[in-house]
Amino acid sequence: MILVLAEQINGSFKKKTFEVLQYAATIAQINQDKVAALVLGSAQQDAMQELGAYGAQEVWHVNDARFDSFSAKAFAKAIQQVATQHNATMLIAPHDVFGKALAPRVAAVMQAGMVAGAVAYPTYDNGFELKKSVFSGKAFTIIAITSSFKVITLVPNTFSVVKGEGQAAIQAMQVAIQDADFATKVNTVEKVTGAIPLGEAELVVSGGRGMKGPENWHLIEDLAKVMGAATACSRPVADSHWRPHHEHVGQTGGTIRPNLYIAIGISGAIQHLAGVNSSKTIVVINKDPEAPFFKAADYGIVGDALEVLPKLTAAMQKFKATN
Amino acid sequence: MKILVCIAQVPDTTSKIAFTNNDTQFASDGLTMIINPYDEWYALVRALELKETGKASAVHLITVGKADVEPVIRKALALGGDEAIRIDVDSNDPLVIAQEIAAYASAQSFDLVLCGKESIDYNNGVVGAMLAALLDTEYIGFAKKLDIDGATASLVREIEGGEEHVVSNLPLVVSCQKGMAEQRIPNMRGIMAARTKPLTVLAGIGAQAQSNIVSYAMPAAKTGVKMIDPENMDQLVQLLHSEAKVI
């Protein structure tokens, strides 16, 4: 059985969980294996059944409200208990804050080889090999896992998600976790509401110093709204408090991999590229024709951000109206 | 309270990456090597701040690598670490690194182990979580703030689309990111003092690798940027739709 970590957020699931399930289902088909989604904590029945439409044959549900608050130690012990009891062959999770806190932890205890941040399906010609991005997107490497139990985290947005048919059978699971293992107490949660989460956005509009000041950001937001895109920014913009820090993408900020990244007034320093160069298509708008970002771009426009943006927004609006 | 800071050596961010031996080995010759920025700017500096404010008694450093990593660990000592351990093992398997560090740390009863959120070479970000598992302690990943009050740590950690304010009991492993502290430059006094600070070399425990690097490859080069007239945004939108197929 391939175990997929299905993170429930207030009882339901996100696209990246569907993507991992679909990825696991493809691997399972080749290996004549099956996929079970492991859900820890309170979750809605219909949301769990729906996981079947993405490739889960079964949902293993640990219905214990203690898991509604995240504690890496307790979660990892629960996953490990389930994996061991049911002779799981693999553990697959998204390469996000949840997966990165748990998958390596389970790998360590189970003495399993791990690939953190896979960007392709495994190949089997010379053992079990997986591709991942290294040196902040400057190269790839192929890693072979030699242990029998294998752990993988998959970079979100690597594959497009197609909803299929079917409902998963829900099975209740018991784990023995002591209260002391829930060693973290959450006091307050601050969530950005309304906006599209940057990490899973397929379209991203991002601004840099070329936007000249926070008062011009409505131009970015207008374009993002028309496109249904998330907004991001470069480091100098976040450091000058023009935009909140969670929007900062680049080496010290977030790493994203959208289908389309539109960089407006961003020169394209290597540290910025490290966070965005895995984007499938990159559009760069910059008034400096020598800006290094053009070398990494698919489409380039030389022009002043504040002049080009309204024109692009208008063109996008026209397109949306007819498509 | 004793803190252990995990230090990795990485090629400088701006390095040109190349491979040798039929693309099976990373060509490190001639590259400038630095302390992994997340380990240095955030984990190490925050540890030093905790010592300076009297909340920690000692800041120990640990690295896993051969003798060529010593200049980097000396720099970490120059920034203010009290003493350093180098485990004389060369491995790319994060589980080997975690097991080697855990074997040392478990015998030393550290209250707090800090590392960066990931190393900028292999971008795994897993050693901290593995280490916490092997030490059977709680783990807080992607922490932006950390303070200590007696046997409790209060932290701010990143979650999906926001942040959480949490408290955890010590001992604890924390992976640190931006917001935790500000970069420091070692001063001459620190550099002089670092020369005589203890740097102990230990043999490894012989942890077995469960994964290995088979080969490297460069990403497919961009076919070249297509320049578009700023007066013709309709063309860009059409290309994004019909050529790139992203909208």
Image: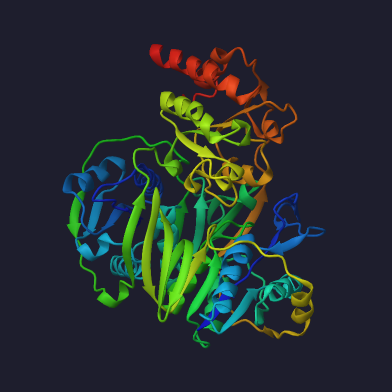
Q: Position of residue A172 (x, y in %)?
A: 18, 60
Q: Is residue A71 left or right of residue B122?
A: left
Q: Is residue A149 visible?
A: no
- From this view, report whether residue A200 is shown above or below residue B29: above
Q: In the orientation shown, which residue stands out farthest toward the right?
A: B30
Find residue A150 and report its image quarter.
Answer: bottom left
How many marks do you count on the picture?
Answer: 0
Q: Position of residue B83 (x, y in %)?
A: 66, 83
- From this view, report whether residue A159 is shown above or below residue A78: above
Q: Is residue A170 left or right of residue A227?
A: left
Viewer-closest of B140 and B49: B49
Q: Residue at x 40, y 45 (%)?
A: A23
Find residue B32 and report its image quarter.
Answer: bottom right
Viewer-closest of A309 and B207: A309
Viewer-closest of B61 and A48: B61
Viewer-closest of A274 and B82: B82
Q: Residue at x 51, y 39 (%)?
A: A232
- Quadrant for the C terminus of chain A in the image: top left
Q: Position of residue B88 (x, y in %)?
A: 68, 78
- Quadrant for the N terminus of chain A in the image: bottom left
Q: Is residue B153 visible?
A: yes
Q: In the orientation shown, which residue stands out farthest toward the bottom?
A: B107
